[in-house]
Structure formats: structure tokens, C-alpha cells
Amino acid sequence: DAGVIQSPRHEVTEMGQEVTLRCKPISGHNSLFWYRQTMMRGLELLIYFNNNVPIDDSGMPEDRFSAKMPNASFSTLKIQPSEPRDSAVYFCASSGWSSYNSPLHFGNGTRLTVT
Amino acid sequence: ELKVEQNPLFLSMQEGKNYTIYCNYSTTSDRLYWYRQDPGKSLESLFVLLSNGAVKQEGRLMASLDTKARLSTLHITAAVHDLSATYFCAVDIISLKSTFGDGTTLTVKP
């Protein structure tokens, strides 16, 4: 089991640029979550998918953020245009088919710095 | 809106001592999770608590859940340096999404 795989591990970009974060969930897991972690706001749920369908995107901060899950093994989180306040660690997590009893399995995160 | 509060937020303790971290939540739930995060690392699951009175133990850590009091505790017995980390509780209600507490940063000193 390779775990949840995120890429890139680090991303440094200039304000106004588009940023795309990628996630491969654990094979067989049917729920996928995008979290953002900052010192000021802690861990925030941005969006989650169940069976590739977005269920709750109420945590997406603005229209600049969008997320897709075109198939069960891949998801992207896109920020366009990026702003310095988007700097954070972005975690992707997945959970198993019995999701109500399953903890989240987190990827290693993407540390995003917007200058 | 579900609120999850942990206390203390920072905890410095000596090796060999015992201590308890508390997690209170505002809405009825019977699914609570504890996670550990080392500095600069990801979160890993420690315990899943699914019913009132549930108790789980792993090494020097023991977690319990009181759904009537809306309270979970993470008890540390005879702390060792390797337990230094940030510990998060997370609560689910109805849907799949977890709401996390702010985390308790534990430092164990020799």
C-alpha cells in the first residue's frame, strides 16, 4: 500500500500564477478530502468527494479555488490566480469504503508559498 | 456549526509523568478520531472511537469517549520523548467530513 500520494511536495510561485496540486488516493478508497493547514486557521476542510462526486465544497474559500476528481485514482486542486494568503500546507486524504468508521489517511502534503 | 475544542493547546511535561488532553465538541456525535502530527510531517491516525464508553489503548496512550458529556480524553502514561508531537481530535457528524480541533502540541522533556 503506497499510501496517499501528493505532488508536488513544495511549490513556490508568484502572485497571480495558476497552481495545480495533485493527489492519488489509496486504491479502493472511495472518499477523498482536501484540507489546508495554516498556523492561524489550523486544519480546514476545503472540499470532499465521495465516489468521485463533490459532496461538500462549502470550505472552498473563493471562486479562485476549484477541485476535480475525474476518476477514482486522481484529484486536483487548482488555485487561479494565486495570492500570498493562499500560502499553506495542503493535504489530501482518503478513507475506505466503510467511510463512517474509517479514519482519514493523509498524504505528505504540498507546501505552497505564494510570493 | 460543530465546534471542537482541545485543551491544553500547549503542554510541556517531563519524562515519566502522566497527563491528559481533553477534547470537547458541541454537537452530538458518536464518531471521534485522534491523530498525531510530527513537525513538518503529515497526520497519522491513532485511535477511532465509535461509541459511548469506548476505550482504546496503544502503548503509553489511551483514548476514551463519553458521548453524553461530548468529551474525549487522551491520556499519556509515563511520557517519553518520542511522544513529542501535536495531537488532534476530530469529530464527524452525519456526513463524512471531520471537524478538527486546534491540536495540542506536546513537548516531553528529559
Image (cartoon, helix red, strand yellow):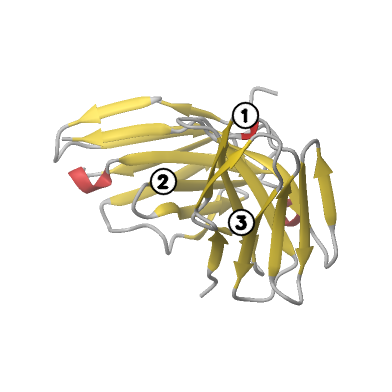
The subunit carrying tag 3 is: B
Q: Earlier in the sequence, mark 1 or mark 3?
A: 1
**What number is the disc on residue B90?**
3
Residue A12 visible in the displayed image: yes
Q: Position of residue A106 (x, y in %)?
A: 57, 37
| Front tag of 1 and 3 | 1
Q: Which residue is mark 1?
A: B81
Q: Position of residue A69 (x, y in %)?
A: 49, 43
The amino acid type found where label 3 is placed reads Ala
Residue A98 visible in the displayed image: no
Q: Which residue is mark 2?
A: A37
For label 1, the crowd category at 10 Å Cα-Cα, with few meaning under 14, some 14 to 19 and many 20 or more, is: some
**Are the residues flagged by discs 1 and 2 from a single subunit?**
no
Marks 1/2: CA distance? 25 Å
The subunit carrying tag 2 is: A
Residue A53 position (above or below residue B2): above
Task: Give the residue displayed 83% in from the left and 44% down from the top.
Answer: B57
**Are the residues flagged by discs 2 and 3 from a single subunit?**
no
| Front tag of 1 and 2 | 1
Task: Give the residue displayed 40% in from the left and 32% down from the top.
Answer: A110
Task: Identify the residue at the far top of this view.
Answer: A2
The amino acid type found where label 1 is placed reads His
Location of the C terminus of chain B by quadrant is: top right
SS of the residue at dot 1? helix
Task: Give the residue displayed 74% in from the left and 47% down from the top.
Answer: B47
